[in-house]
């Protein structure tokens, strides 16, 4: 029997993976205790998505285990054992701001939870492929010291810099930089996943995501940039831009495209490997450009305000270079561009809000 185990299965990437893998594995085991609601309140709850998965996929089985607790994880791994062929670890505390409120919780979820899953994999299904969704925040604020140029709607890197053509590659340093508490906990997890690949010879892979997005995101003010922005465009709720004149740039990758990267890696894993994963030059925008797109798609004028205070550890300009991954897996390419992704977010969000009303 071939089983895929997905942590954070009711979240954006986890739920996309359940749908993607549903016809590729005999069963999908989901682990998600909806801590996103604890982090972000009602806006962040993933209960609706968990229910959707259970109603849609007959092979999906859900567990509400807490990844910080080995006694809750071990019975699951013991039950399925070597039948588990893939562990996709997407569960996380994902916010800079929230992490500083409760560092123990943040580190427990992001770092300790990852170690627990790695060790359960090593003990019960060591031949499985272990894929970890890391973050570009492991680079800290090093990207902010690149030679940046201000334009009318965005910050952009100097066109003579090596990163101009494709973006930031995996050689950027993780050291001598401010990460935020969140970034530091993800660094710990990132390095541990690499080490289990290099030290124990396990089939581990690390994917350092840019802005991950898509129609099944439970966006909230502290996390889920495009999803929450579109929600504000639809509802008329006020959105706050934090610093950098609203010209900060992010690359955005659709959740399906990211899971497709995972699928390519699963079929031909490279133990301990690290990849940047984002929209690259194919799909990126500044905050101001995203607002313009939201207004165009929703037909509504956005209600937003500006704060001069940027978020600690936030990037001014970040575009991922996916050249390394595309060299290793040349059949992979992006499927969804930025506007198509945002239209999907709008339609999904509008339908969910209509149900709530």
Image (cartoon, grey):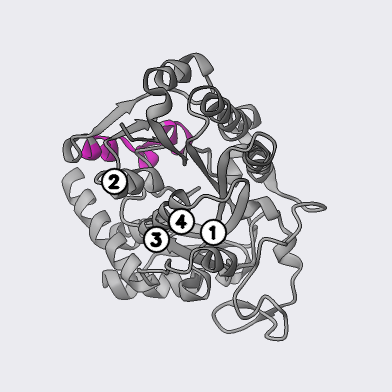
Kindly identify the residue that appears in the image at 52 percent across and 30 percent down.
Answer: 126
Instruction: Report the mark closest to the observer, 4 or 3.
Output: 3
Crowdedness of circle 1 by 10 Å Cα count: few (<14), some, many (20+)? many
Res. 155 image quadrant: bottom right
Could you tell which of marks 1 and 2 lies nearer the N-terminus? 2
Asked whether the beta carbons under mark 4 and mark 1 sit within 8 Å of each other, the answer is yes
* Residue picked out by circle 1: 210
Kindly identify the residue that appears in the image at 27 percent across and 55 percent down.
Answer: 349
* Residue picked out by circle 3: 257
Label disc, if present, on residue 24 of the rendered structure:
2
Asked whether the beta carbons under mark 2 and mark 4 sit within 8 Å of each other, the answer is no
Instruction: Report the mark closest to the observer, 2 or 4.
Output: 2
Chain part drawn in magenta: 35-53
Could you tell which of marks 4 and 3 lies nearer the N-terminus? 4
Crowdedness of circle 4 by 10 Å Cα count: few (<14), some, many (20+)? many
Kindly identify the residue that appears in the image at 64 percent across and 27 percent down.
Answer: 104
Could you tell which of marks 3 and 2 lies nearer the N-terminus? 2
* Residue picked out by circle 4: 212
């Amino acid at each position: 029997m071939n089983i895929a185990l997905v942590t954070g299965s009711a979240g954006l990437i986890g739920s996309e993976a359940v749908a993607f893998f549903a016809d590729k594995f005999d069963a999908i085991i989901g682990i998600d205790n909806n801590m996103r609601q604890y982090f972000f309140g009602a806006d962040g709850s993933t209960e609706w998505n968990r229910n959707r998965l259970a109603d849609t996929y007959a092979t999906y089985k859900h567990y509400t285990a807490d990844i910080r607790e080995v006694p809750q994880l071990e019975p699951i791994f013991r039950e399925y054992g070597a039948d588990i062929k893939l562990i996709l670890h997407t569960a996380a505390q994902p916010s800079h701001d929230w992490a500083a409120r409760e560092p123990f919780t943040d580190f427990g979820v992001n770092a300790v939870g990852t170690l627990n899953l790695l060790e359960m994999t090593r003990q019960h299904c060591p031949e499985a492929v272990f894929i970890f969704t890391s973050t570009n925040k492991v680079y800290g604020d090093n990207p902010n010291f690149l030679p940046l140029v201000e334009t009318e709607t965005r910050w952009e890197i100097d066109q003579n810099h090596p990163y101009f053509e494709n973006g930031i590659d995996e050689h950027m340093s993780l050291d001598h930089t401010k990460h935020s508490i969140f970034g530091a906990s993800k660094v710990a997890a990132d390095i541990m996943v690499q080490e289990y690949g290099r030290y124990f010879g396990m089939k581990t892979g690390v994917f350092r995501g840019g802005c991950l997005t898509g129609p099944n995101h439970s966006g909230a003010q502290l996390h889920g940039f495009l999803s929450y922005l579109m929600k504000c465009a639809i509802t008329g709720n006020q959105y706050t831009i934090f610093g950098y004149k609203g010209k900060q740039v992010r690359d955005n990758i659709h959740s399906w495209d990211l899971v497709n990267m995972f699928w390519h890696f699963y079929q031909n894993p490279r133990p301990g490997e690290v990849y940047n994963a984002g929209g690259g030059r194919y799909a990126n925008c500044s905050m101001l450009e995203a607002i313009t797109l939201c207004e165009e798609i929703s037909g509504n004028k956005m209600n937003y305000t500006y704060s001069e205070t940027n978020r600690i550890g936030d990037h001014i300009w970040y575009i991922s270079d996916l050249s390394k991954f595309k060299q290793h897996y040349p059949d992979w390419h992006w499927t969804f561009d930025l506007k198509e992704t945002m239209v999907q977010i709008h339609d999904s969000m509008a339908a969910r809000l209509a149900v709530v009303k």
